[in-house]
Image: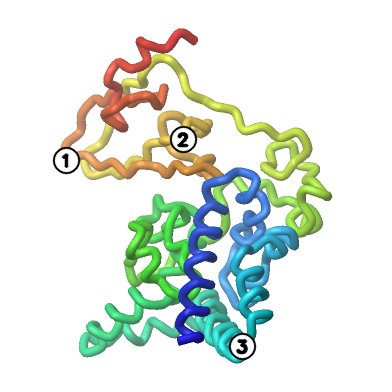
Amino acid sequence: MALPFVLLVDDFIQYWYHRKAHEWSWLWNLHRPHHTGPDMGVMVTFRENIFYVMIIPNIWFLGIVTYLGLVQAVAIALVAKYIVVVSAHSEVRWDRWLYKHKSMDGLAWIIERTISTPATHFAHHGKSSKDGISNPTGNFSNMFFFWDVMFGTAVITREYPEEFGIENDPKDHWAAHLYWPIIKSDKANSEIGDGYHKEMTTVKEPLLNEVEEGKTYWWCSCGYSKDQPFCNGSHNGTKYKPMKVQFDKSQKVSWCTCKMTKTSPYCDGSHKQLTV
């Protein structure tokens, strides 16, 4: 029972740590280097800020259970976990053969909901969910993908994004990536730059514009996008994610830009209650 205990508790802790790294701004700044890589590959697995690694809670958990005598279970768990995690980052894309053969569909369904695969983890590293494949605000699992399934953050498309990284990447120096907050970026528009402050871009009036039939729009829900009312990726490091909206006919839409509406993404008049 020691091995399942170590595997499940370790991975459960890391799922939530990883998820919060995309929701808490200070932790996102530590995790951000992992997502700035323009490509996927084995080495991306280890592309992390040193302080992000130092405070990973499941590492401390593994240290405690090792001290308590579960040495063998920890050793086996680490090997098993890194085989899955590294292969999920690998350009080998080993899961493709499962999707090519109809006879393997049932097995593929089980595997992709049990462990992280290149398709599901590549989606997490995709630049934007606007491509219909990427899920940078979900697919947080490291070894066991069923955490995402259980907690509603899973997107499974069996496809691979064409673009990786983060939107509006200022291309920070590697030292800032590795050692923030001790070393900060010299880019004025960088989240890890000295004195950077993410400003709200909400306004008190709705935006009325014409939308096209069949076109997909991504409404900004965080209030930080400079492309209001649409997403530009500024939700990184917040609990918000953009809302996908499609229309079955061309029409005029009153988009909420105050972010107070209860009928997202449309204006419901809530801005009239704002005093500023």
Residue at 55 percent across and 84 percent down: it is 77
Q: Could you say where residue 240 lies in the image, as x and y percent from the top left?
A: 44, 41
Disc with the residue nearer the chain's start (2 vs 3): 3
Quarter the N terminus occupies: bottom left
Single out the mark in the foreground, 2 or 1: 2
Quadrant of residue 69 within the rendered picture: bottom right
Q: Which amino acid type is marked by label 1?
A: Asp
Q: Is residue 240 above or below residue 82?
A: above
Q: Work out how far the residue at label 2 is from the one at label 3, CA to CA, in angstroms.
A: 42 Å
Among all residues in the image, which is located at the extreme top?
A: 275
Q: Work out how far the residue at label 3 is from the one at label 1, CA to CA, in angstroms.
A: 55 Å
Single out the mark in the foreground, 3 or 1: 3
Few, some or many C-alpha atoms within 10 Å of disc 3 (few <14, some 14-19, many ≥20)?
some
Of residue 172 and residue 224, the one placed in the foreground of this image is 224
Q: Please indicate, yes or no, whether residue 44 appears anywhere in the rendered image.
A: no
Q: Is residue 18 above or below residue 235?
A: below
Could you say which disc has been placed on residue 75 in the image? 3
Disc with the residue nearer the chain's start (3 vs 1): 3
Q: Work out how far the residue at label 2 is from the one at label 1, CA to CA, in angstroms.
A: 26 Å
Mark 2 lies on residue: 222
Mark 1 lies on residue: 248
**Disc 2 secondary structure class:** loop
Q: Could you say where residue 105 lies in the image, as x and y percent from the top left?
A: 24, 83
Q: Which amino acid type is marked by label 3?
A: Ala
